[in-house]
Image (cartoon, rainbow, N blue to C red):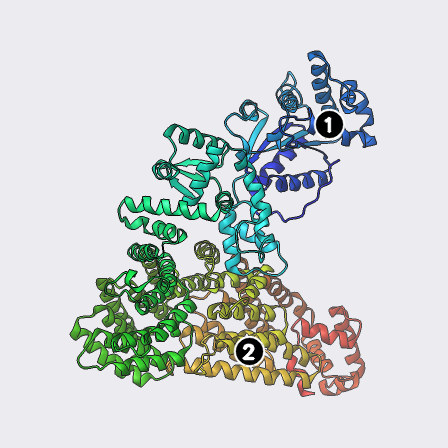
Amino acid sequence: MSQISISTPLIGREDELTRLSGVLERARSGEARAVLVAGDAGVGKTRLLDEVTVRASTAGMTVLTGHCVDLGDVGLPYLPFTEVLGALAQDERFAGALAAYPAVERLLGGGAVGDSGGRLRLFEGIAGLLADLSDIAPLLLVLEDLHWADQSSRDLLRFLLSRGILQRSAGGAPTHRLAVLASYRADDLHRRHPLRPLLAELVRLPGVERLELRPMADGEVARLVRSLREAPLPDHTVRRIVERAEGNAFYAEELVAATGNGDGGVPSGLADVLLIRFEQLSDTAQQVLRTAAVAGRRVEHDLLRDAVRLPEEELESALREAIGRQLLVPGEGDTYAFRHALAREAVYADLLPGERARLHGAFARLLEARGHRSESAAERAHHYRESHDLAEALSASLEAADHAQRVGAPAEELRHLEAALDLWSAVESTARPSGEGVDRVRLMLRASAAAAHTGELHRAVSLTRAALAGVGQEADSELAARVRYTLAGNLMSVDNLTAAFAYSSEALAMIPADPPSRTWVWAAATHVMAARHVGENEVALRVARQALGTAEQLGVPDAQADLLISLAVLEGGGRRTEAGRERLRQARELARRAGSTPVEMRALFNLAVGCFESGHLDECLPWLTEGLDRARRAGLLSSPYPMEMRYLQLLVLYTLGRWDDCVRAAHADADVLPAAGGYTMAPALYVGLARGDRRATDRARALLEGPFDWMATLVAGIALTDAAALRGDAEDAVQRMRSTVAALTDDTGALPHVTVRLATLALSAVADRADDLRRKGDQAGARRWAATATELVELARTTAANGERGIPQGPEGQAWLARAEAEWTRALSGPDAEAWARAVAAFDFGDVYEPARCRLRYAEALLVADRREEAVAEARAAREVFARLGATVLLEQVDELIRRGRPTASLLTARERDVLRLLARGRSNRQIGEELFITGKTASVHVSNILAKLGAASRTEAVAVAYRKGLIAPETTARG
C-alpha cells in the first residue's frame, strides 16, 4: 500500500476536502464514484490527495496509488497500474484475489498482453480484481499525473470508468465500495494533448465528476508561508511572497526556501521548473515570449508586434504555440498575459543584459511615439530607466506621479516620486524638468505627503528630514518654514511630540504674521496641534484664535476648517459636548466645500470620537461609515485618520456586543490592508480571547515583532494583560500592563488614556491572588499584593481624572475606573457588593460585555454576603450575555457560581452557619460552645453535620469547601 508522507501543512481547501470526503463516504456505503482532480502545477493537488488518503486509511479503506511519469514519447505501458499491482502482490491479504486473474498476473510478471482479445481479458481482469478487493474492504484508487499517462493506461482508465468498476447492476443498485481519484495538470493540456478527448468523454459519465483546484486565496498563502518557518518572517516579506506566488503553494514554498538568499529574483530551482515548458517552444515562439517578458505581465498585440518585428503570420503562429502550451493567455482588449507572473520573471531573468536594455529601449520609444498619455507614463518611466535613458526616465516618473495623484493613488505616487528622487542627481541639471515646484526639496515634501497618505508614517518623517537637510540656509523662508511645519506634522503622527513642538515653533518664527500669508496660517494650524499635544493649551488657544481670523481674512477654507477642529477640541467641554460637535460639523462642511479630504476626515474622526467619549455609541457609527467611505473614494484608506476610524469602528461594534460583525469587518479590513496591524485586528483579538481562541494570544504577540508601532503595542498590551488575568497569572498581568504603559507614554511624560483599562485588567488578577492568599491564611502575601493593587488603582485614578487637558475621562474611562475601585477593594478586604453594583451601573452606556463581567463579580460579592437569590439572578443575567456573545471562557465560571448559589446553602441551618464561621476562625468545639452558649457536645454534633453536608473529611477541608462555595466571607479569617 502507499506510504503517505506529508511534509507541509494543508491550508484552506476545506470545501474540496468536504467534497472528497463525501465521495469516500458514498464509496464506503457501496456507491462507486470517480473524481478527476484538475489544477495547475504546484497548486496543491498532491497535498490534497495525501490528506484524503490519510482520511481514507483512518476510516478503514484500502488505499492504492499509482503514478504516471514523464518519459517523453517512449512511455511504459500501464505504468501506474503496474505500480498498483506491485503493491498488491506484496500484501498477503490479497494473494487469493490476485491469483484469480491470470491475465493480470501476466502483466505484473512482464508478460505480453497479446492481441485485442488478450487486452480485453486484461482490462476485464483488472476491473474484476478491483471489484473483488472492494468486497474485502472499501477501496480508494489514486492515479496521479494523468497528463503523463501512456496510451494504454488512458485506454484502461476509460474502460474502468465507463464499462468496469463504476457500472451498476441491471436494477441500478450500486455494487462496489470503491472510489477513484485521478489528478492531472490543467496547465499542461495544450490543444492537441492526448488526454483532452478522454477527459471530455469521462466527465459525461454519471459516476464521474470533475474537481478544479483554484489558486489559494492570499490569506491562505500567507498562513502557509508563516507555517513553513519556525522563526517569524517580516510582514513585508510575507506580503511579497504572497504577491509573487499568486495562489500557488509550490511557488510559495520555493520562495520561502529562497528567502534570505540572493536578490529576490526567481529561485534557481523554481526557474528551472518554470523554463521547462518555455524551452519546448520553437525559436520564434521563444523570441516572442522574451519580448513579451520585457513588456511586463501583460502586453497589447500591436505593441508586441512592433517590438518583435516579425511578419504578422509568424507572430500569430508563435502566439498560438505559446497559448497552446499555456504560457500565455489571451485577454481583453487584444492583449496577452503570462499565465503566471513567476513564469514571466523566469523568462525575463534568462535574457542577456544587452538584449534586455535593447528591448526596454524599443518599448519606451514605441510608447513615446503614441503620444504622452498619462496612463502610460509609468510604463515609459520603467522602460527608459531599464534602457539607461535616465533623463527621459526622470521626466516620465514625474508625469506618472502627477497621474497617480490625480486618480487618488498615493502609494503609486510615492513610488514614482521616490524613483524621480533617485534619478535626480544622476541627471544633468540642464536635462532635468523645470517649472514651479520641481526641485529636490519640494519633491521630497510632496513624497512625504504621499507617504503619510499611504500610511508609511516613518517614511514620511525620513523624507521630510531629508528635505530639511536639503533646504539648508534656503533664502526662501516660506519654503524653509513649510518644511519645518510639515516635519512637525509628520512627527506628531509617530508620537515624537516634543520634537514636533520644537519644529512647529521654528516654522512659526521664520515668517511674520503680518502681512498675512497662507504659509503662516498653516504653520500656525500645525503649531496649535503640536502645542496641544505637549500640554501648552493656552498657547494653542491663543494661536488658534489668531490664525482662524487670518484664514477667514485670506479666504483659506481648508485651514479655517482645520483650526475650527482644533478649537472644538480645545474650548469648553471639547468634542464631547453638543456645542463642540456642532463646531466639528461646521468644519466638515468647510473642508468638503474646499475639496480638502484630509481635513474633512479629521473632522469626521473627531465627531466619531466625541460621540464615543460621551457614551453615544450608536451615533458614532454613521460618522465612521461616512469617513471611511470618503477615504475610500479618495484613495486614502491607509492614511492616519482613516486608520484610526477603522479601529474605532471595530471597537464600537465590539463594545455594542456585535461581535460577529466586528470579526467580519476585521477580516475584511485585513484583506484590504494586510499591513495595518493593530488598527484592523484589535477588537477581533479581544473577541477571540473571550471565546477561548488560543491563537488570539499568538496573534497579539506577533504584533510586537518588528519596529515599534504605537497601535500594535496598545492592542497587544490589552490582549496579553487580559489573557494573563483570565488564566490567573498576576505577575505576568502586572508586567504586561507596566511595559505597555511605559512604551505608550509619550516624550512629554503623559500617560496614555488606555492606562485606566490596562490597570483595571491587571488589578483583576492581583485581586484574585490577594483574595486567594488571604483565604489560605497567608496574610503577609495578601498584604504585598494589596500594596500592588493600591499602586495600580492610584495610576487609574490619576489617568481618569486628568484625561485630556485636565478634563476627566468620559463614560468609558469612568466605568473602567469604577471597576478598578471594586477590584482594589476586593484585593484589600474581599468582595464588596456595593462597589460592584456601581461598576455595573457605570458601564451602562451601551457596553455589553464589560457590565456582564462586572455583574459576575457582583454576583460573587452577593454570594459572600449570603444574598443568594440576588446572586443567582445577577449570575444568570451575566450568563445570558456570555452565551449570546459566545464568551465561553467565563461561562464555566458563571455556571459554577449559579450552582454554588443554589442547593448547598439551604442544606445548612442558621445555627450550622454560625458554627461554620467559628470553625473558620480556628475555634475548638469547647470554644464554639462557649461563644454560642451551647454545650461542647452539641457543638461537636453540629460540626459532624457540617462535615457530612459539605462532603468534607476534616474541619480544615470543610472550611476550604465553605470558602470555595461562598458560604462564609473570606474576611472572617482576619478577625481571629
Residue depicted at 65% across the width and 73% down the height: 966
Are the residues at dot 2 and dot 1 in contact (C-beta closer than 8 Å)?
A: no
Q: Earlier in the sequence, mark 2 or mark 1?
A: 1
> Is residue 956 or residue 485 the one in the foreground?
485
Q: In the image, is 429 to the left or to the right of 251?
A: left
For image coordinates 52% across by 40% down, the residue present is: 214
Amino acid bearing label 2: Arg
User: Tag 2: Cα neighbours inside 10 Å, few (<14), some, or many (≥20)?
Assistant: some
The foreground one among 847 and 107 is 107
Q: Is residue 861 left or right of residue 799?
A: right
Amino acid under label 1?
Answer: Thr
**Quarter of the image that includes the C terminus:** bottom right
Say which residue label 1 marks. Answer: 82
Q: Is residue 957 something that shows in the picture?
A: yes
The quadrant holding residue 970 is bottom right
Quarter holding residue 630: bottom left
Question: In the rendered image of this protein, does residue 587 appear above or below residue 510?
Answer: above
Circle 1 SS class: helix
Q: Position of residue 84 (x, y in %)?
A: 73, 30
- One can see residue 969 in this view: no
x, y percent for residue 176: 69, 25
Disc 2, SS: helix
Point out the frontmost of discs 2 and 1: 1
> Where is residue 908 drawn, in percent x and y?
69, 72
Q: Residue at x 51, y 66 (%)?
A: 852
43 shown above or below 68: below
* Horizontal relation, residue 266 to residue 138: left or right: left
Density class for disc 1 (Cα within 10 Å; few <14, some 14-19, many ≥20) is many
Q: Position of residue 6 (x, y in %)?
A: 68, 46
**Residue denoted by label 2:** 738
Front-most of residues 711 and 45 = 45
